[in-house]
Image (cartoon, rainbow, N blue to C red):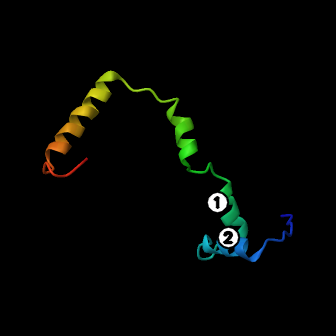
């Protein structure tokens, strides 16, 4: 396998090292961290726009929320 040497500052090295698991190489840390789609709020919103749910599902969720809210004392704001 070919290799490439890179230079990073100490802060970057510390961040990378903090994500390193026991027995894991830095290459594997980079692949694991950057190779996957990042789990961010922005990516969640991008995926949510493609999801559709039925009115029955939404009605059921409203019912469940109301039932759970009824379990709490009135002085708890939800």
Q: Quadrant of residue 14?
A: bottom right
- Residue 27 placement, left or right of 67: right
Please report the residue visible at 19 percent of the width from the left and 44 percent of the height from the top: 68
Q: Secondary structure at mark 2?
A: helix
Disc nearer the start of the sequence (2/1): 2
- Give the quarter of the figure containing the N terminus: bottom right
Please report the residue visible at 79 percent of the width from the left and 71 percent of the height from the top: 8
- Residue 78 placement, left or right of 10: left
The residue that disc 2 covers is 16
Q: Secondary structure at mark 1?
A: helix
Where residue 65 sits in the image (x, y, percent)?
24, 39
Depth order, front residue of 3/48: 48
Please report the residue visible at 72 percent of the width from the left and 70 percent of the height from the top: 12
Image position of 49 with respect to 6: above or below: above
Label 2 or label 1, whichever lies nearer to me, is: 2
Where residue 3 sits in the image (x, y, percent)?
85, 66
Please report the residue visible at 69 percent of the width from the left and 59 percent of the height from the top: 31
How many numbered circles are shown? 2
The residue that disc 1 covers is 32
Badge 1 crowding class, 10 Å Cα cut-off, few under 14, some 14 to 19, many 20 or more, is few
Image position of 1 with respect to 35: above or below: below
Disc number placed over residue 47 in the picture, else none: none
C-alpha separation, residue under disc 2 versus residue under disc 1? 11 Å
Where residue 40 sits in the image (x, y, percent)?
56, 49
Badge 2 crowding class, 10 Å Cα cut-off, few under 14, some 14 to 19, many 20 or more, is some
Q: Quadrant of residue 13?
A: bottom right
- Residue 69 placement, left or right of 47: left
- Residue 75 placement, left or right of 34: left
Q: Are marks 2 and 1 in contact (CB under 8 Å)?
A: no
Depth order, front residue of 55/69: 69
């Amino acid at each position: 396998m070919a290799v490439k040497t890179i230079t990073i500052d100490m802060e970057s090295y510390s961040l990378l090292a903090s994500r390193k698991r026991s027995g894991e190489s830095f290459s594997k840390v980079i692949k694991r961290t950057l190779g996957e789609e990042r789990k961010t709020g922005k990516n969640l919103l991008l995926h949510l726009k493609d999801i559709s749910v039925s009115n029955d599902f939404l009605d059921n969720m409203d019912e469940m929320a109301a039932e759970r809210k009824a379990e709490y004392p009135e002085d708890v704001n939800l």
